[in-house]
Image: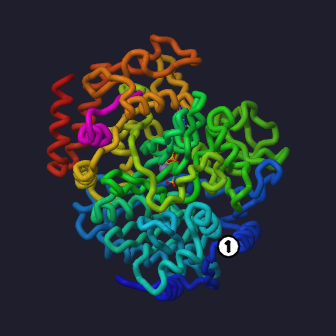
């Protein structure tokens, strides 16, 4: 249903009956005003924002959410296409009319006594032909401030929208944060999302996963491009040449860390372009070009420290963009700084946990929620690529896919060609993490790291990937990695983090044709000695284990893949089925 911005705001006001309507302009004064409002407001008994130590963490504020609202809720997330088959077995589905009726019931009068923030925003740099116009309404000042960091909010969006009705509409209310009245409903065929009952990131910042992945993946399917759960980064060699990579990893499996990585080798540098979402188009010369539609990081705090991610620690202390938010970390009361496991070795003695209680270090529980996050502008990042705002995006030479697996999957291998790469990506399995509510550590299939984010049937999605490869002149090389393989004692065998640059350097050598491969059952493996391990204390035996293919493990893996593929019946492209038969033959 076509509807101008004015009409949309009018309808929302009539539906939710807020006592105020505030249209955001994106200015600095506005941010200061909203922060000040948030410091005075309470949502179910919690002050929305508290100022943190300005000397240690400039312009930073602390937010504690309802303990029932700390991660994405996949079981309450629906894709409401006209036909159930369009949403596919990878999505929860509801009839669009039924879904709207249900949501309208929740939204009716939901903002009584509250302010409705109208957030006009652009996903992508506004000069880009790939950028998209969006509007979200919300009654959460925390969401309004977060959206301001994560996307380009304000006048530019209003100007781009003008009197047209061609923009994404996101309708959001935190309601009373009741999990029984919590739903995130997507209507890809109407460019619309309705979200009620949660203030948490991926459920509530509708420009992020809801629009830029679920809705945008559907748009991309219609229009011939890809919206992916991927980092974008440039790898600079000592000669000064920059090669661009995409990297897809499931939630909380290392994207933010990878794109802010400081290589261990002299002369090499990594340029950051995006840590979560990439929109990929076929551009100049028939190559793939990627843009990051977002303008901030909504990153996992736990595990982030000067040893693991020094660039992010610098980003968090860089005060260029106002404000930076910390959600559900612990707080060190001795100096009013946010604290989380991994930010320092010793546990401070005056610590409040993420729920605001005095931390008991004998509890066996972490002080920060494992999915505690920071929300910080990408412009604060010292390694931000000069190409970040380039409207045409950056040309892609390599795509990395990974998962979190304690066994089975080797440290790295290359796939033979695009279609083998699409197959390898379609069979990714990964252990579930704290980024989504539910049990942790279960291996589930997470094709292209998109299982929770693909806005249509994954059978069609796989075919779309294959079709893109046929249209691209020189398809990027596709690599598979696993930083998370463990030994018999349950310890990570690969040091990870900055040492991942050793594997990236190998990929660069492969792209430049500087090193050969040996062919194995599942793909192309590094020749012995071709991953540069200089200065790293790792045993040859460990490297062998990291690259090992265990036939028993792979037999099990193949039966899990068959089970997953079977859910899609004949929607799985013939090409991929053939790859699976061929793989099975080998084991
Ligand atoms: P989302 O924001 O949920 O999409 O997560 P992400 O993919 O950006 O993951 P992130 O980089 O935030 O990492 C998640 C967790 O994995 C953090 O606790 C990191 O410290 C940890 N991690 C990241 N890279 C590595 C690695 O190479 N090895 C090990 N062992 N842990 C890692
Ligand atoms: C993820 O879960 O992949 C995230 C956090 O990046 S959220 O924005 O909540 O989706
Ligand atoms: Mn993510």
Q: Residue at x 46, y 66 (%)?
A: 128
Q: Residue at x 30, y 44 (%)?
A: 475
Check the picture and name the quadrant holding the N terminus. bottom left
For residue 84, side relative to residue 140 (left or right): left
Check the picture and name the quadrant holding the C terminus. top left
Looking at this view, is 428 or 99 the one in front? 428
Q: Is residue 423 magenta?
A: yes
Residue annotated with mark 1: 27
Start-end of magenta stretch: 412-427
For residue 230, side relative to residue 495 (left or right): left
Residue 345 visible in the displayed image: yes
Coloring scheme used: rainbow
Q: Is residue 182 magenta?
A: no
Q: Position of residue 153 (x, y in %)?
A: 58, 70
Q: Position of residue 528 (x, y in %)?
A: 39, 15
Q: Residue at x 59, y 32 (%)?
A: 267
């Amino acid at each position: 249903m076509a509807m101008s911005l004015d009409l949309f705001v009018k309808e929302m006001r009539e539906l939710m009956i807020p006592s105020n309507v505030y249209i955001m302009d994106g200015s600095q004064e506005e941010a200061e005003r909203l922060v000040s409002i948030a410091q005075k407001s309470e949502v179910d008994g919690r002050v929305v924002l508290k100022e943190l130590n300005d000397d240690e963490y400039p312009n930073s504020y602390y937010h504690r959410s309802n303990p029932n609202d700390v991660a994405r809720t996949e079981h309450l997330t629906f894709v409401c296409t006209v036909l159930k088959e369009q949403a596919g077995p990878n999505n929860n589905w509801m009839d669009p009319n039924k879904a709207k009726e249900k949501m309208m019931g929740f939204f009716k009068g939901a903002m009584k006594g509250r302010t409705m923030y109208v957030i006009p925003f652009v996903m992508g740099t506004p000069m880009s032909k790939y950028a998209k116009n969006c509007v979200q309404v919300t009654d959460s000042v925390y969401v309004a401030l977060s959206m301001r960091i994560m996307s380009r909010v304000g006048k530019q969006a209003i100007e781009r929208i003008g009197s047209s009705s061609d923009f994404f509409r996101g309708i959001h209310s935190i309601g009373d944060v009741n999990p029984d009245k919590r739903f995130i409903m997507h209507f890809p065929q109407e460019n619309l999302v309705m979200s009620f009952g949660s203030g948490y990131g991926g459920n509530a910042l509708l420009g992020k996963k809801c629009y830029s992945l679920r809705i945008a993946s559907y748009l991309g399917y219609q229009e011939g491009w890809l919206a992916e759960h991927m980092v974008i980064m440039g790898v600079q060699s000592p000669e000064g040449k920059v090669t661009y990579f995409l990297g897809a990893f499931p939630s909380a499996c290392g994207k933010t860390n990878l794109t802010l990585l400081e290589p261990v080798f002299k002369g090499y540098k990594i340029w950051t372009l995006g840590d979560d979402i990439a929109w990929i188009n076929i551009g100049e010369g028939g190559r793939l070009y990627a843009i990051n539609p977002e303008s901030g990081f909504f990153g996992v705090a736990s595990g982030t420290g000067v040893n693991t991610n020094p660039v992010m620690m610098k980003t968090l202390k860089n005060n260029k963009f106002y404000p930076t938010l910390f959600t559900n970390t612990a707080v060190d009361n001795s100096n009013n700084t946010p604290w989380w496991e991994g930010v320092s070795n010793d546990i401070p003695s005056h610590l409040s946990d993420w729920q605001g209680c005095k931390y008991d270090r004998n509890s066996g529980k972490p002080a920060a929620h494992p999915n505690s996050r920071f929300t910080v502008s990408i412009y604060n990042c010292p390694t931000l690529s000069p190409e970040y705002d380039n409207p045409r995006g950056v040309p892609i030479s390599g795509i990395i896919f990974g998962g979190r697996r304690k066994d089975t999957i080797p440290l790295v291998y290359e796939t033979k060609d695009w279609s083998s790469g699409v197959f390898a990506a379609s069979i990714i399995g990964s252990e579930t993490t704290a980024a989504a509510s539910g049990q942790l550590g279960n291996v589930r299939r997470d094709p292209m790291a998109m299982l929770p984010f693909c806005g249509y049937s994954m059978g069609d999605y796989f075919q779309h990937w294959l079709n893109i490869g046929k249209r691209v002149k020189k398809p990027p090389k596709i690599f598979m990695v696993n930083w998370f393989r463990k030994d018999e004692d349950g310890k990570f065998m690969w040091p990870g983090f900055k040492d991942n640059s050793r594997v990236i350097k190998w990929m660069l050598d492969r792209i430049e044709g500087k090193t050969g491969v040996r062919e194995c059952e599942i793909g192309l493996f590094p020749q012995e000695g071709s991953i540069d391990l200089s200065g790293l204390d790792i045993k040859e035996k460990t490297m062998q284990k990291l690259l090992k293919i265990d036939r028993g493990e792979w037999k099990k893996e193949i039966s899990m893949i068959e089970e997953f593929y079977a859910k899609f019946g004949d929607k799985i492209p013939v090409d991929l089925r053939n790859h699976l038969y061929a793989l099975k033959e080998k084991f």
